[in-house]
Image: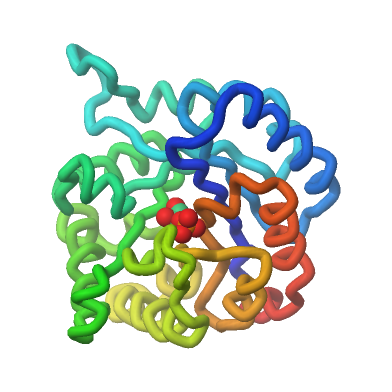
Amino acid sequence: MRRPLIIGNWKLNGSKKIANELISYLRKELIGIEDCDIVIAPPIVYLHLVKQALISISNIDLGAQNVDVNLSGAFTGEISVNMMRDIGVKYIIVGHSERRRYHNESNEVIAQKFLMIKNANLVPVLCVGETEKEHIRGKTNEICAHQINAILKIQGVAAFRNAVIAYEPIWAIGTGKSATPLQAQTIHKFIREYLAEQDTTVAKTVIILYGGSINDKNVAQFFYQPDIDGVLVGNASLNANVFSTIVKIAATCKYFNTK
Ligand SMILES: O=C[C@H](O)COP(=O)(O)O
């Protein structure tokens, strides 16, 4: 059975004050909610603060939004997987469309980062998804398969054991225009079947999240899709009340027991 997973990606947002307010609210609201896993991925400088406040809650883990491909050396400004592990990070987002777009990260670089994360025994959250143009042209499956292939090529299907895939259509990120639950389900099913061609156990157990304009009002229908195991939340994770509601909906969604 796959446990529901909710990741809050704060992206480049917040301040010490905002981070403190968010986590003290989450602490009150999320304590005792055990039927799903929760990850908070703040900007790196606030990881420690989040850790101190939330990590005693057993099903809340720390996430990082990015990592370097190198382990150490003269790489000014970079942070390695070992450093992340050192401070208690468990999940690392890799291949987010914003990194692909603004930092020119190629599928090859993303695959190398994915490998570093796996080698450090951390959990990679691989983001895949198509642009609006590709969506209109019906290229979604092809794009997602291509992005997944980059990992398969150098690491094989076993790389997806204890890994997370997040399907994030780029046109749905931060636009307020999410994919429909059925559209997302269709792609999630495709991804699972694509992996099943190589390993049915990996395909059955890999956690596949949906991301893109998720909020407390639209999230429930996503959870009722058989291949959607949770959500990667951007904007709405900055509102403690909305984020807690999303988590509570996941934790009480009995349908997860059948996945
Ligand atoms: O990492 C999160 C996703 O990019 C979704 O962002 P969003 O919820 O603001 O659309």
Name the quadrant containing residue 134: bottom left
What residue sits 27% from the left and 23% below the top?
71
| In the depicted structure, whether residue 158 falls above or below residue 67 | below
What residue sits 61% from the left and 40% below the top?
61
Name the quadrant containing residue 149: bottom left
- The image quadrant where one finds the C terminus is bottom right
| In the depicted structure, whether residue 30 falls above or below residue 177 | above
User: Of 251 and 70, which appears nearest the observer?
Assistant: 251
**In the image, residue 229 lies at what x, y percent?**
56, 69
**In the image, residue 164 lies at what x, y percent?**
44, 58
User: Of 64 and 151, which appears nearest the observer?
Assistant: 64
236 horizontally vs 134: left or right: right
User: Of 53 and 178, which appears nearest the observer?
Assistant: 178
106 horizontally vs 83: left or right: left
Residue 165 seen: no
- The image quadrant where one finds the N terminus is bottom right
Residue 66 seen: yes
